[in-house]
């Protein structure tokens, strides 16, 4: 039992370290993208070194503070009415409930039950948050090319940029219309269009919105045909959508294989438990069997996650 406990703790620590490395890498990629967008938004002839010094902004220190900041960013990207404290409280409650259930059903010790409940609660929370974020991203990107075309036509018709944003917000439904309405309200309260779009880009963390913010910022500084720029951006977004659809079609076989390989152990184990319960009872009654069962579940989940990552296009 002690060996199994130490092995489970090692697997849990390894999984936690892998998740922490993933968060750090994604945060670094996001910072690099922000830096590139900031350079593109500079006026012609200027470099980041030639900008006036700004007061340093307090950055979150420590791993816990960075994790909370990343969690807040993910919650904002998913547009959920939650705070990081409430999200962590919910994960803690689910951990306790799952730990009690696992301890009563499997008969394991409290430490193993808490570790299992924590892994399941954190994993389920991360999966749900990613699903909500992806759903909102699709809802934002689906009408974006048409919205940019509408904005371009409004500019060609002689409307000013604030009026064009108001007209676009009234004609666009869903979360994208709400975001443009917020931009129009900020512009109506005295903010410039570049500043309002920059805040929108920070909220949404979408490359397409970053490009829109940079285009408006450059046009406000140097001038130019913004309507033509918006039309080219809408065309580029449509082409990128086609490439993503082609990539999903090419990786459909790998996703189907991952689904079959994940369902096969569960299906075979359930069939054996139904036909011959005594044959599978050792996996529940014996501590070594429970450890092997948990290790097999973690291995299957890790393999599915790896195959899903291999079949996903880079952002």
Image (cartoon, rainbow, N blue to C red):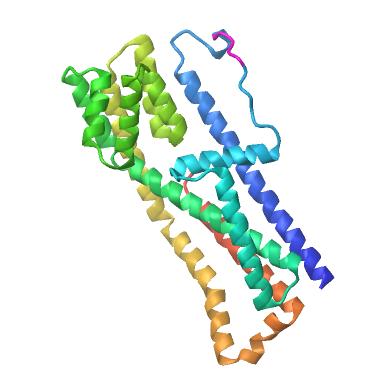
**Residue at the image point whose x is 20% and y is 19% from the top:** 159
Instruction: Choose top left, top right, bottom left or bottom right for residue 166.
Output: top left
Q: Is residue 299 in view from this perspective? A: no
Q: Is residue 36 in view from this perspective? A: yes
Q: Is residue 11 above or below residue 291?
A: above
**Residue at the image point whose x is 58% and y is 39% from the top:** 70
Q: Position of residue 73 (x, y in %)?
A: 52, 38
Q: Position of residue 64 (x, y in %)?
A: 68, 41
54 relative to 15 in the view: left or right: left
113, 32: nearer the viewer: 113
Q: Is residue 170 above or below residue 257?
A: above
Q: Is residue 102 above or below residue 308?
A: below
127, 166: nearer the viewer: 166
Whether residue 266 appears in magenta in the rendering, the answer is no
Instruction: Choose top left, top right, bottom left or bottom right for residue 48.
Output: top right
Question: What count of labels does the image hold?
Answer: 0
- Residue bounds of the magenta highlight: 51-55
Q: Is residue 213 above or below residue 10?
A: above
284 relative to 139 in the view: left or right: right
**Residue at the image point whose x is 83% and y is 70% from the top:** 2
């Amino acid at each position: 039992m002690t060996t199994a406990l130490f092995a489970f703790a090692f697997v849990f620590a390894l999984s936690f370290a892998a998740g922490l490395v993933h968060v750090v890498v994604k945060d670094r990629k996001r910072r690099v993208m922000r830096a590139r967008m900031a350079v593109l938004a500079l006026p012609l002839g200027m470099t980041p070194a030639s900008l006036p010094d700004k007061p340093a902004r307090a950055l979150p220190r420590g791993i816990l503070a960075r994790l909370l900041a990343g969690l807040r960013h993910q919650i904002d990207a998913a547009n959920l009415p939650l705070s990081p404290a409430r999200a962590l409280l919910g994960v803690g409650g689910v951990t306790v409930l799952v730990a009690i259930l696992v301890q009563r059903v499997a008969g394991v010790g409290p430490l193993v039950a808490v570790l299992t409940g924590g892994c399941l609660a954190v994993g389920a929370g991360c999966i749900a948050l990613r699903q909500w974020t992806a759903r909102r991203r699709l809802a934002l990107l689906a009408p974006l090319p048409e919205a940019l075309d509408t904005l371009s036509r409004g500019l060609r018709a002689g409307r000013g940029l604030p009026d064009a944003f108001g007209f676009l917000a009234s004609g666009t439904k869903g979360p994208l219309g709400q975001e443009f309405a917020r931009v129009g309200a900020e512009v109506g309260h005295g903010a410039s269009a570049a500043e309002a779009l920059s805040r929108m880009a920070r909220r949404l963390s979408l490359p397409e919105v970053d490009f829109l913010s940079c285009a408006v910022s450059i046009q406000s500084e140097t001038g130019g045909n913004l309507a033509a720029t918006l039309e080219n951006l809408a065309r580029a977004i449509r082409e990128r959508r086609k490439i993503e659809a082609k990539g999903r079609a090419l990786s459909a076989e790998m996703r189907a294989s991952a689904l079959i390989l994940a369902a096969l152990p569960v299906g075979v184990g359930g069939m054996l438990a139904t036909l011959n319960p005594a044959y599978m009872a050792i996996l529940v009654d014996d501590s070594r069997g429970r450890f092997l069962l948990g290790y097999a579940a973690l291995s299957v989940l890790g393999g599915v996650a790896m195959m899903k990552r291999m079949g996903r296009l880079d952002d």
